[in-house]
Structure formats: C-alpha cells, structure tokens
Image (cartoon, rainbow, N blue to C red):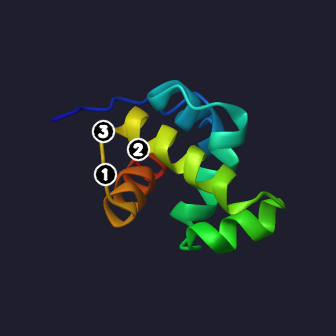
Amino acid sequence: MAVFIRDGRRAVESSADVLRALFAFTTAEVHFARLLAAGLSMDEAGKRLGIRRNTCKSRLKAIFAKTGVTRQAALVGVLRDAILAL
C-alpha cells in the first residue's frame, strides 16, 4: 500500500515527471508508457512514436520490470493510478 501526500499550494508535476520519479523511466519509456495509459495498443503506440515493433517490445519489457507488472492491462492501471494520484 502507498500513501501519497500532496501540498495543495505546490504546482502539480506533469505526468512525465511523476512517472520518472516513481518508476525511474527514461524519457523514451515515459512517452511510450503515456500512450499505453491513454489506451493505445503497443503497436499503435509504436506507430505514433515511429518506432519498430522490436523496440516497442524492449520498452514494454523495461517498463514491466520497473513497475513490477507482467501484463499490459495491469500496467495501464498502475500508470493511470500513478498519474491521477498526484
């Protein structure tokens, strides 16, 4: 269980900053993860970013390792919770 406390006077960080801070994502992983959280498939996200399927697989594998999930549906839940929590 995690508890998040936020100072209401402080500006909310962008979702990219939150994902970097929580999961140590690279910039490339952040872009890919945000598209997945928005509901795009791995292939759709790859097309949008102009990257090949094998690159998508590598990024997804790294993101899985950093978030502790093994399924894309679970990943989307974790990412949405992380982005919305702060």
- Upstream in sequence: badge 2 or badge 1: 2
* Residue in the image at 32% along x and 32% along y: 4
Write down the quadrant of residue 19 in the picture. Answer: top right
Q: Residue 21: image x %, image y %?
A: 52, 25
Tell me: 61 left or right of 78. Answer: right
> Which quadrant, please, contains the N terminus?
top left
Which residue is pictured at 75% across the width and 59% down the height? 52
Residue 11 shows up from this direction:
yes
Could you tell me if the residues under marks 2 and 1 are in contact, i.e. CB atoms within 8 Å? yes
Where residue 25 sits: x, y (%)? 57, 32
Question: Looking at the image, which residue is at 30% across and 39% down?
Answer: 68
Q: Is residue 26 left or right of residue 76?
A: right
Q: Which class describes the residues within 10 Å of circle 3: few (<14), some (14-19), or many (20+)? A: few
Give the residue type that dot 2 points to: Phe
Residue at the spot 79% in from the left edge and 68% down from the top edge: 48
Residue corresponding to mark 2: 64
As drawn, 49 above or below 11: below
Local crowd at mark 2 within 10 Å, few (<14), some, or many (≥20)? Answer: some
> In the displayed structure, would residue 47 be above or below residue 76?
below
**Residue at disc 2, secondary structure:** helix
Q: Using the rendered view, name the quadrant where residue 6 is placed.
A: top left
CB contact under 8 Å: marks 2 and 3 = yes
User: Which residue is denoted by mark 1 in the rendering?
Assistant: 70
